[in-house]
Image (cartoon, rainbow, N blue to C red):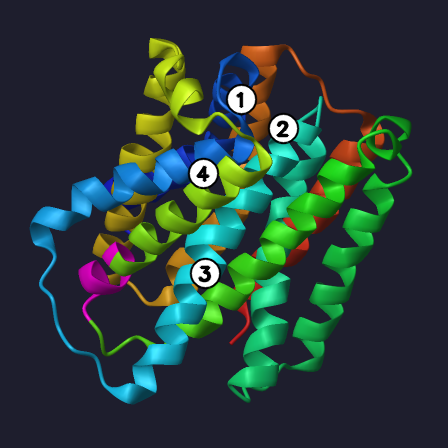
Amino acid sequence: MSAKHTLLILFVVFLLGSAYPTGKLGLNDTIPPILFGALRMSVVFICLIPFFKFQIVEKKFIIPLIGFSICFGVAVNMFLYLSINASSILAPITIGAQLSIPFGIILSSIFLNEKISYKKWLLITTSFFGIVLLAFDPKVTEELIGSLLICGMAFFYGLSQVFSRYLKDLDIKFTNTIMSFTGFLILIILSSIFEGNTLQTIKNISLGSWLTVLYAGAIISLMGHLMMFYLYKFYPVDMVLPFYALFPVFGLILTFFIFGEVPSLITVTGGIIVITSVFFAQKIR
């Protein structure tokens, strides 16, 4: 990979890692978690709508498109921001989000009949061991709900990638516009039911919180993924994807500078095990 593209992929994983501390900033201010996810999806939808071309999809794509839209647009955003909201420390959930890769590999094996080598199984098991190790951190024990919620996010992220494999023949702008609209619509309804006073809450959102929403939708979701797809034009997936393992590193660094949070020795050890296992699991074909 050229130096220019290496810097680009590092910038992308920096953006992905920044989702956690910047999301916490918005939630700490004036936005409840489900509403934050809904507003993020609305930003993605608004940005994509000028490029959207309506088409009638074949019957075989309908269920995968619904599954992808619900898993990625609804469940991933809901569980992500619920976990951030439920946690006073971000390190465990930033690391726990890496489970999306092992979940994706396992689910691909179940639904797509993709073979998993013994080496991959060993690395997947090791990554889960790293997460279990985090549970022995006294601080994480007090954050059990947040840790469980991020595991839910990781599961649905992995499942969404399985659904996306069935949609590879559809235009990505079409599928992501449908996904973002579905996510916004369902999440705004759920926010109205469980968080209440949605319109009043939106009116009271501060400028700083709106900036975190815009950043999450336009910069992280759109710019980050567009740059990743750009790199896929030049390099195979197995060369680009391992860099995803680095986003917790940037997330932890940003969390330190923004919130002054210093991970414990157990968290660092568990994080190294998880990140290393995920890195090598993605490199094995």
- Under mark 2, the amino acid is Asn
Could you give the CA–CA distance between mark 2 and mark 3, rounded to whole angstroms? 21 Å
Could you give the CA–CA distance between mark 1 and mark 2, rounded to whole angstroms? 6 Å
Residue 174 colored in magenta in the image: yes
Residue drawn at x 47%, y 52% is 74
Tell which of 36 and 116 is nearer to you. Answer: 36
Give the quarter of the image for residue 165: bottom left
Q: Earlier in the sequence, mark 2 or mark 3?
A: 3
Could you give the CA–CA distance between mark 3 and mark 1, rounded to whole angstroms? 22 Å
Residue 95 colored in magenta in the image: no
The reply to whether the C-beta atoms of the residues labelled 1 and 2 are less than 8 Å apart is: yes
Residue 85's label in the rendered image is 2
The residue that disc 1 covers is: 27
Q: Label 4's element?
A: helix
Q: Earlier in the sequence, mark 2 or mark 4?
A: 4
Residue drawn at x 56%, y 60% is 156
The residue that disc 3 covers is: 70
- The answer to whether residue 3 of the structure is visible from this angle is no
Residue drawn at x 58%, y 57% is 100
Q: Label 2's element?
A: helix
- Under mark 4, the amino acid is Gly
Could you give the CA–CA distance between mark 2 and mark 4, rounded to whole angstroms? 12 Å
Residue 37's label in the rendered image is 4
Q: Label 1's element?
A: helix
Q: Earlier in the sequence, mark 4 or mark 3?
A: 4
Q: Earlier in the sequence, mark 1 or mark 4?
A: 1
Neighbor class of circle 3 (other Cα within 10 Å; few <14, some 14-19, many 20+) is many
Q: Label 3's element?
A: helix
Residue 13's label in the rendered image is none
Please tell me whether the stretch drawn in magenta is mainly helix, strand or loop.
Answer: helix
Give the quarter of the image for residue 253: top right
